[in-house]
Image (cartoon, grey):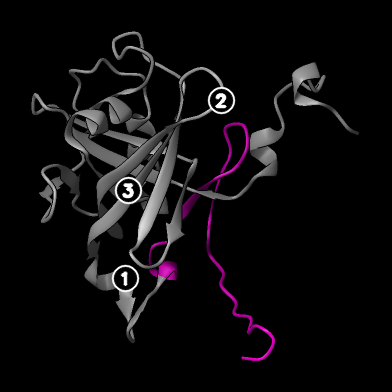
Amino acid sequence: MFYRPEDGHGLRHNPFNAIVTPRPIGWISTRGADGSENLAPYSFFNAVAYVPPQVMFASTGTKPDRHGTKDSVSNIRETGEFCVNIVEYAMKDVMNTSSGVWDREVDEFEKAEIEKAACETIACSRVAAAPASLECKLTDIVTLKGAANFLVLGEVTGVHLRDDCVSDGLFDILTYQPLTRLGYRDYSRITEVFSLKRPGE
């Protein structure tokens, strides 16, 4: 099968998200200039550089009360800060609750009964029980082709690691089993790890 996206695929559901998998989930917490808090998951998320450490996430779609984007991007535009919280399998249900299209006044931390903790280098909350949280200062927002598609880039200025996830000097993902996004409404968790050496190492 071959199709050109502009012509359509003829399937029941768009296969694009199911092809590019698994994707890590960036659970983005922000605070608006008015002090309102927001927490929302994004599966177009990844790390993009080591030194200095940098991450990105992309927001697609819009809310009627946010003038062409969503709460996360709107808040980041106002304050220049955000925190990426890593999602573990045990948090799948509260993460899903926070993904709802709630009014801008709704605090998803409170809606999903998620405990907050203060960040150290930025002025927004993080998920207290997250395996890891990355405090970020905005470096750029890139307008992508298409309606309401924005790429947000940030430099990591602070890193929180949950104590039980650090073992023998390594951040051990099997202690929390990262939740990953697949296609459609499907998710998966990482339960197995293996290592490969590059040629010449």
Q: Which residue is mark 1?
A: 165
Q: Position of residue 137 (x, y in %)?
A: 24, 48
**Cβ–Cβ under 8 Å for marks 3 and 2:** no
Residue placed furthest toward the bottom: 200
Q: Which residue is mark 3?
A: 154
Query: Hey, what amino acid is under mark 3?
Result: Gly
**Who is closer to the viewer here, 192 or 71?**
71
Query: Where is residue 76, by image quadrant?
Result: top left
Q: Position of residue 69 (x, y in %)?
A: 37, 20
Disc 3/disc 2 C-alpha distance (Å): 20 Å
Q: Which residue is mark 2?
A: 145
Q: Residues within 10 Å of mark 3 (few under 14, many from 20)?
A: many
Looking at the image, is 24 positioned above or below residue 40?
A: below
Query: Hey, what amino acid is under mark 1?
Result: Cys
* Residue drawn at point x = 71 percent, y = 24 percent: 13
Quarter of the image that includes the N terminus: top right
Is 177 contained in the magenta span? yes
Q: Residues within 10 Å of mark 1 (few under 14, many from 20)?
A: some
Secondary structure found at label 1: helix
Dominant SS of magenta comes to: loop
Is 176 contained in the magenta span? yes
Range of the magenta residues? 173-201
Which of the marked residues, 3 or 1, is nearer the chain's N terminus?
3
Res 130 visible: no
